[in-house]
Amino acid sequence: MDWTDTARGRERRERQAQLAVPDRLPLLAPEQRALLRRWAAKDSPERRRTTLLAAIRGERIEDAEALCELLLREGWIARREQLVGGRWQWETLVWRDLPRLQALLDVSSPRQRKDQRALQLAQAQDWLQARSDAANADALDPDLLDELAAALAQLVQDTALRPDLLATRLALLQAIAAWHDDAAQGTRRDFALRAGGGTKALTHADWRWLEGQFDLERRRIARFAPMLWLAGALRLQWQAHAVDLAPLRCLGLPLADVLRTDATSAPVRWWLIENRASFERQAQLRRPGLALAWLPGRPSAAWLQAMDRLLALAPAPAWISADIDPAGVDIACTAGALWDARGLDWAPHEMDPSQLLATVQHWPLNAHDHQLLDRLAQRAAMPAALRALCDSMRQAGRKAEQEAWL
């Protein structure tokens, strides 16, 4: 074997084979390949012997020494050695072409992982900005946009997140958005099937992260079957069987069962309430003649269908109460369209400018809110009370959640 030895001081040298850096890897045993992948996983152009031997896991020191000799003979490394007791002992390994070796081993370097992470996050930010600027009004849900932006900001801050986990989290953001856009409603297994291709595709860690970033119930991703929550002066009948809600605080019924309802008692008025805590507080009062329903944020097509079934059996005017924010106005109009379609009256309730101005909440309108206000201003069929509320929000520059007063 021909070597090139370069003196590096008294009794020290740097040795390398007189070969060009190879285009392919030598034949390696699985253990050797695993060890070499660990050695090549950092961007440092040289590695000390003590550091490399510390990377040994199931291998023997003899195997590591043999791997180093093989790399030297094949031309992948130069080796800095010291003469000790008449024998040359290597101290440092110097990569001759680390990027080529990493590519052949399919190992990403820290620099590559950093660049990949930056590209993934930049693409996600472009996607979110495009969504915010979209002409499709259905995609302009300020609450969801805020949640998506906050979740993306958290991922930007979490620099320790592995690239594969970052890719999974970013894919979940898009899956949540697609679920919203399709007005989907279902269980967590339904969402996992759509997002990951299997009902158990998401790990416990994935669900914990989603729970920390999104109000999943409001996004119509339930732990169990989708429900319609009702309370008040209402009796539902399925042929010879019936459920009377009057003595109960509230009751959740599967949407499929609501669609099978044969008959109901007729309330004096329906009252749809968006905030869950507000719904339960009002349900506890049991006001005569009022039938209450929890309006779960932007209602799904399935929820609207179930509510419309009850409205067909028990037509009555409605109050609709949602948050005093642009999304709340949009939600109220979406639910109110059921009453419009049947020629029934409905009106926003507890959604007055006076409540906005009196509340201690001072939540400023953000860019997403202003975009939705602009869209709402172009909507011809909107109750005058809601149009006035939009004007008040724009003038005050803020919004509020109904739980503060209802």
Image (cartoon, rainbow, N blue to C red):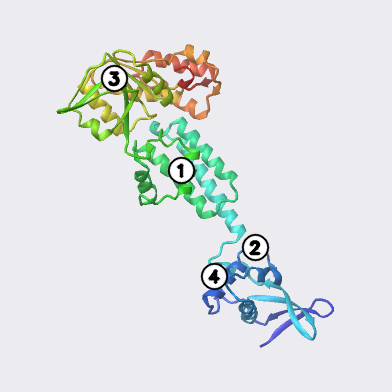
Answer with mark 3 or mark 1, whichever residue precedes in sequence. Answer: 1
Name the disc covering residue 43, or none: 2
Q: Which residue sits furthest left? A: 240
* Badge 4 element: helix
Question: Of the residues under marks 3 and 2, which one precedes in the sequence?
Answer: 2
Structural distance between the alpha carbons of marks 3 and 2? 70 Å
Position above or below: 205 against 216: below
Q: Which callout, 4 or 3, points at the residue further toward the start of the chain?
A: 4
Q: Give the labeled residue for mark 3.
A: 246
Left or right of residue 215: residue 294: left
Q: Is residue 313 above or below residue 68?
A: above
Q: Are marks 3 and 2 in contact (CB under 8 Å)?
A: no
What is the spatial separation of the Cα atoms under label 3 and label 1, in whole angstroms?
41 Å
Judge the density around disc 1: few (<14), some (14-19), many (≥20) Cα neighbours within 10 Å.
many
Earlier along the polypeptide chain: callout 4 or callout 2?
A: 2
Q: Which mark is residue 235?
A: none
Q: Position of residue 117 (x, y in %)?
A: 56, 51
Q: Amino acid at mark 1?
A: Leu
Point out the residue furthest to the bottom here: 1
Which disc number belongs to residue 173? 1
Residue that carries the numbered disc 4 in the rendered image: 104
